[in-house]
C-alpha cells in the first residue's frame, strides 16, 4: 500500500514563532529570578555576590562596550577565564548580541593556544588576572587580536608591561545598559569550543543559539542533571571545558542559584564553598571529586546540603560512587563530548528498575547512561553493520541529535558518516538504552585479536584503598600484539611494600576480570600525566613506557 504521507498537504501550525536565542535565557532569569544569586570566588581573592538581575544588566552593558570597540556581528571573542560572574556576563553579552563567545582552555600548550586564537580569528581576548603572564607571551603571536581586556577593576590592573591593555570594569562603567537584545535566526553561531585532542591540531565545535537552548532544556530535565529553582549549583567543570557542560545556561533557565569556584579547586576550597553557599549539586571530572572526597574523609567531615554530584569526562570509578554514597551524595554518571555540546547520556534508573536488587541497580548506574531526549545513539561493528542493543555486543559509537556537530569550524570536510557522528568511543548499549563505554578506540588493548578494556581494569584497581590513581595501557608484545600494563600511583602515606600491594591488586583484579585480561605487569609511578581537561593522558603515558620490555615469561 502506498504511504498515506503527502508532503503537499502538510498544514503549517498557528503558534507564535520565537527563535531559540541565548539572550532569552538571561531575559527569563532577569524577569523571574532577578534576586537569585550568583556567588563567585574571585581570582582577586575575595567572594563576590550579585543577582541574575545584576548579571543581565552588566551583560547588556558588555554588549554596548563591544559595539564601542567595533567588535562586529559574527566576530569571535576569546576568553581565558575561570568560572566566575564576569565570564558569565561574557557568555551572554557576546552571544546575546550576535557575536561568538570563544572559550579557550588555558591549560593547553602555548603552541595550541596560539593556533586556536589565530584559527578562530579572535578579534578581542578577555582574560582573568591569573593569565596575565600567559597573555603577555601570547600577544605577539596573535597579531589579529585587536583588543586585550583584563577582567578586573582599575585597582587590580597590572601596573605596566602590557601595551593597550583594557580594563573590564572601565568598559562596563562607561555604558548605561540601555540595550535591547537583537532578534535573529536561531541557527546563528553563539559559541565556539575547541576539542582538546591529544593528537593533531584542536578542532572547533561551533554551537548555535538553537543547539545551546535545546541542550539547556535537556540538561535541566529531572532524568538529566535535574536542575530546579530549589538548587544551588556549583559548576566545578570549567567554563572553558565545553561551556561547563551547559550549566551557565541551564541554571538561569531554571532559576537555580550559581556558585562559581574560580581558580581554587582543591578539596578544602570546594568543601568550604559547598557548606557556606548551601550547594545542593555540582558537576565535574572524577579527579576533582577524588580530591574533595579525600579531604572530607580525612577531616571526618560531612555535607549538610550537598546531595548530587554529576561526574563525567572520564569513567567514574565505582569506588568513587561508593565513597560519595557513604557521604549521602548521589553520583550521576554522565557521558558527553565537545562535539555533543556536551551532553549525550545520563545514568538514571527507570520505574521498572526500582524492584531490582541494589547490585543490579548499581550496575545500571555505573554505566554511562541512556541518551537524553534529543540524542540518538547506535553502535557499529567491524563490517559497518549496526550491532544489537543487547548490552553485550560492542562497537564504534555513533551519535545524532539537535546538539551534535555537523561540521568543524573552518574545515570543509564533513566529519559525518551517513548523517552520523563517529564519537571515537567503543561501547555497548543494553535493551533499555543504557550505554556503557568499553574504551576510547585508541586506548583499547588489542591482545591476540581480542579486545581488553583498559577502563574496566582501572575501575577494578582503583577500588583498592592504597591506589591514588591508576592507568592501564597496551604495550607491544611479541606474541599477542599488545598486553596490558597497569601503572599505579600509590596513595600518599600508604606505606605498603610494592610487592604486597601488587599481590593484593592481582587478587582484586582476578575476582573482577577474565584471567587473560590480567595485566602482565603492574608498575609504580609518582604521577600519571593528565590532559588539559583532567583526563588520563594515555598517549604521553604510552610514550613514557615506550621502551618497556616484558620480562621473560610474561
Ligand atoms: P571532551 O570532548 O574533551 O569532553 O572528551 C570527550 C570524551 O571523553 C568522550 O568521547 C569519552 O571518550 C570521554 N568521556 C566523557 N565522559 C565519559 C564518561 N562518563 N565515561 C567515560 N568516558 C567519558
Image (cartoon, helix red, strand yellow):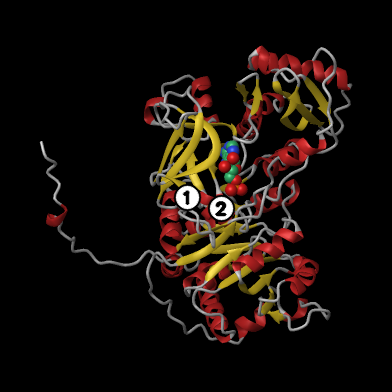
CB within 8 Å, label 2 to label 1: yes
Residue 139 x %, y %: 75, 73
State which image quarter holds ligand 1.
top right
- Give the x, y percent position of residue 343: 50, 47
Q: Is residue 391 left or right of residue 312?
A: left
Binning the other alpha carbons within 10 Å of mark 1 as few (below 14), some (14 to 19) or many (20 upward) gives many
Q: Mark 1 points at which residue?
A: 227
What's the mark number on residue 400? Answer: none
* Residue 117 showing in the rendered view: yes
Can you tell which quarter of the image residue 515 is in? top right
Label 2 residue SS: strand
Q: Name the residue rendered at 66%, 28% in the picture.
A: 454
**Residue sitting at x 44%, y 63%:** 209
- Residue 356 lies, with reference to residue 319, above or below; the image says above
Nearest to the observer: residue 310 or residue 412? 412
Quarter of the image with the N terminus is: top left
Residue drawn where x is 48% and y is 56% of the image? 407
Q: Can residue 79 be seen in this view?
A: no
Front residue (pair 469, 327):
469
Q: Distance between the residues labelled 2 and 1?
A: 8 Å
Residue where numbered disc 2 is placed = 233
Amino acid at each position: 500500500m502506498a504511504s498515506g504521507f503527502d508532503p503537499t498537504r502538510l498544514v503549517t501550525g498557528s503558534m507564535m514563532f520565537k527563535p531559540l536565542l541565548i539572550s532569552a535565557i538571561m531575559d527569563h532569569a532577569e524577569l523571574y529570578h532577578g534576586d537569585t544569586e550568583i556567588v563567585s570566588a574571585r581570582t582577586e581573592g575575595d567572594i563576590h555576590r550579585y543577582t541574575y538581575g545584576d548579571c543581565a544588566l552588566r551583560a547588556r552593558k558588555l554588549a554596548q562596550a563591544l559595539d564601542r570597540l567595533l567588535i562586529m556581528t559574527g566576530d569571535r571573542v576569546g576568553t581565558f577565564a575561570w568560572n566566575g560572574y564576569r565570564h558569565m556576563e561574557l557568555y551572554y553579552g557576546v552571544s546575546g548580541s550576535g557575536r561568538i563567545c570563544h572559550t579557550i582552555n588555558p591549560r593547553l600548550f602555548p603552541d595550541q593556544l596560539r593556533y586556536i586564537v589565530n584559527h578562530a580569528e579572535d578579534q578581542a581576548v578577555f582574560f582573568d588576572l591569573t593569565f596575565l603572564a600567559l597573555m603577555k607571551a601570547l600577544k605577539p603571536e596573535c597579531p589579529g587580536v585587536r583588543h586585550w581586556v583584563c577582567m578586573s577593576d582599575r585597582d587590580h590592573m597590572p601596573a605596566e608591561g602590557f601595551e593597550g591593555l583594557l580594563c573590564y570594569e572601565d568598559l562596563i562603567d562607561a555604558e548605561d545598559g540601555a540595550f535591547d537584545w537583537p532578534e535573529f535566526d536561531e541557527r546563528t553561531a553563539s559559541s565556539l569550543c575547541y576539542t582538546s585532542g591529544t593528537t593533531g591540531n584542536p578542532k572547533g565545535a561551533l554551537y548555535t543559539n538553537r543547539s545551546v537552548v535545546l541542550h539547556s532544556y535537556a540538561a535541566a530535565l529531572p532524568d538529566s542533571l535535574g536542575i530546579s529553582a530549589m538548587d544551588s549549583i556549583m559548576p566545578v567543570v570549567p567554563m572553558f571545558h565545553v561551556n561547563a557542560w551547559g550549566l551557565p545556561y541551564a541554571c538561569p533557565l531554571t532559576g537555580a542559584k550559581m556558585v562559581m569556584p574560580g581558580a581554587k579547586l582543591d578539596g578544602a576550597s570546594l568543601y568550604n564553598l559547598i557548606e557556606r553557599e548551601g550547594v545542593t549539586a555540582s558537576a565535574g571530572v572524577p579527579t576533582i571529586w577524588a580530591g574533595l572526597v579525600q579531604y572530607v574523609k580525612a577531616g571526618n567531615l560531612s555535607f549538610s546540603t550537598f546531595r548530587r554530584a554529576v561526574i563525567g569526562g572520564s569513567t567514574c570509578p565505582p569506588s568513587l560512587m561508593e565513597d560519595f554514597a557513604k557521604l549521602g551524595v548521589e553520583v550521576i554518571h554522565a557521558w558527553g563530548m565537545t562535539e555533543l555540546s556536551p551532553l549525550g547520556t545520563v545514568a538514571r534508573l527507570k520505574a521498572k528498575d526500582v524492584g531490582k536488587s541494589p547490585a543490579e541497580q548499581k550496575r545500571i548506574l555505573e554505566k554511562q547512561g541512556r541518551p537524553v531526549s534529543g540524542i540518538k545513539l547506535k553502535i557499529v561493528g567491524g563490517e559497518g553493520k549496526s550491532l544489537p542493543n543487547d548490552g553485550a555486543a560492542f562497537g564504534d559509537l555513533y551519535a545524532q541529535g539537535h546538539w551534535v556537530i555537523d561540521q568543524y569550524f573552518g574545515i570543509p570536510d564533513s566529519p559525518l558518516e551517513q548523517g552520523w557522528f563517529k564519537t571515537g568511543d567503543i561501547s555497548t548499549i543494553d535493551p533499555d538504552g543504557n550505554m556503557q563505554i568499553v574504551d576510547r578506540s585508541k586506548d583499547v588493548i588489542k591482545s591476540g585479536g581480542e579486545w581488553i578494556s583498559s577502563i574496566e581494569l582501572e575501575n577494578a584497581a582503583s577500588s583498592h584503598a592504597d591506589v591514588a590513581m591508576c592507568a592501564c595501557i597496551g604495550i607491544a608484545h611479541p606474541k599477542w600484539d599488545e598486553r596490558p600494563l597497569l601503572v599505579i600511583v600509590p596513595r600518599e602515606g600508604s606505606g605498603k611494600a610494592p610487592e604486597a600491594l601488587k599481590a593484593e591488586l592481582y587478587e582484586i583484579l582476578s575476582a573482577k576480570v577474565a584471567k587473560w585480561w590480567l595485566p602482565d605487569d603492574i608498575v609504580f609511578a609518582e604521577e600519571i600525566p593528565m590532559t588539559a581537561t583532567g583526563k588520563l593522558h594515555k598517549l604521553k603515558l604510552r610514550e613514557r613506557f615506550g621502551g618497556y620490555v616484558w620480562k621473560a615469561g610474561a
